[in-house]
Amino acid sequence: MPNRLDELERDALTELGNIGVGKASTALSRMLGGEVLVSVPTVEFVPGNQVAERLETTLPGRLVAVTETLSGAFRGSAVLIFPERSSLPLASAALPPDVPKEDAPELEGEALAEVGNIVLNSCLASMANLLGTRIETTLPEILRGTAAEILDACGVDQGADPTAILFQVTFNAKRHDIGGEIVLALDAASAAGLKAVLDGYIGRILK
C-alpha cells in the first residue's frame, strides 16, 4: 500500500502512543481513585474487514464505546471501548463522591462521555504536542453494540480495502474490575500526512 509506515515511523508512533496512553492512564486513575494498568500500544496495518475481528478477540459480545472523530494530523476515530457490563460501574466510579450511587444510572451517559473526553484527549493532546501539530476532535458520542456495529457507526471502512492503521492498547482498573481498550482506527488515506509529521518528529529527536 502506498505511504505505508516504515519500521522507524511505526516505532515512533508506538512510542508517542505509549507516552500519550500514560497521560490518559494518569487521568483515568485520578477519576476512578485507583491504579489503572495499561499495555504497551500496538500499531498495525489491518484490512478494514479485520478490525472488528481483532477487537472481538479481546472484547466479545455487546460493548459500549465513547467515540470521537479525528481530523488534522490524524484522520479517523478515537474510541474508548469496554464490555457493556462495565458501563455502569465505570460511570459510577467516575462520578463525584457526593453523588448518590442510586443516581448513577440516570447520569451514566453524561459520566461516560466525560470519562471518554478526558481519556482520549489526554492521549491525543500529548501525542500532538510531541509531534508539533494539531489533532482536532469532535464532541464524544456514546455507542452500544458489537464491535462491528460500533465501528460502522464510527464510519470505519470495514471493507477489505482500504487498510486501516489500528492503534490499540488495553487498560484495566483492578479496584473496580473494569477493563477495556483505547483504539485509534486511523484512515489509511491520511498515511502521507502522518508520515510527514512522524518524519519531522524523528528528525528532531535524532539531532
Image (spheres, grey):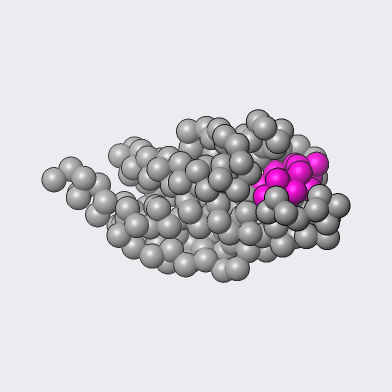
* Residue displayed at 67% across by 37% down: 179
Question: Residue farthest to the left?
Answer: 207
Residue 179 among magenta residues: no
**Can you see residue 99?**
yes
* Residue displayed at 47% across by 51% down: 123
Front-lying residue, 43 or 174: 174
Across and down, in percent, residue 180 comes to 65, 40
Across and down, in percent, residue 65 comes to 69, 52
Residue 84 among magenta residues: yes
Left/right of residue 10 with respect to residue 165 in the rendered view: left
**Is residue 9 placed above or below 122 in the rendered structure?**
above
Left/right of residue 39 with respect to residue 89 in the rendered view: left
Front-lying residue, 54 or 174: 174
Residue 18, by quadrant, is top left
Q: Which residues are magenta?
A: 81-94
The dominant secondary structure in magenta is helix
Across and down, in percent, residue 116 comes to 61, 55
Front-lying residue, 52 or 174: 174
**Is residue 95 placed above or below 83 in the rendered structure?**
below
**Is residue 177 placed above or below 120 in the rendered structure?**
above
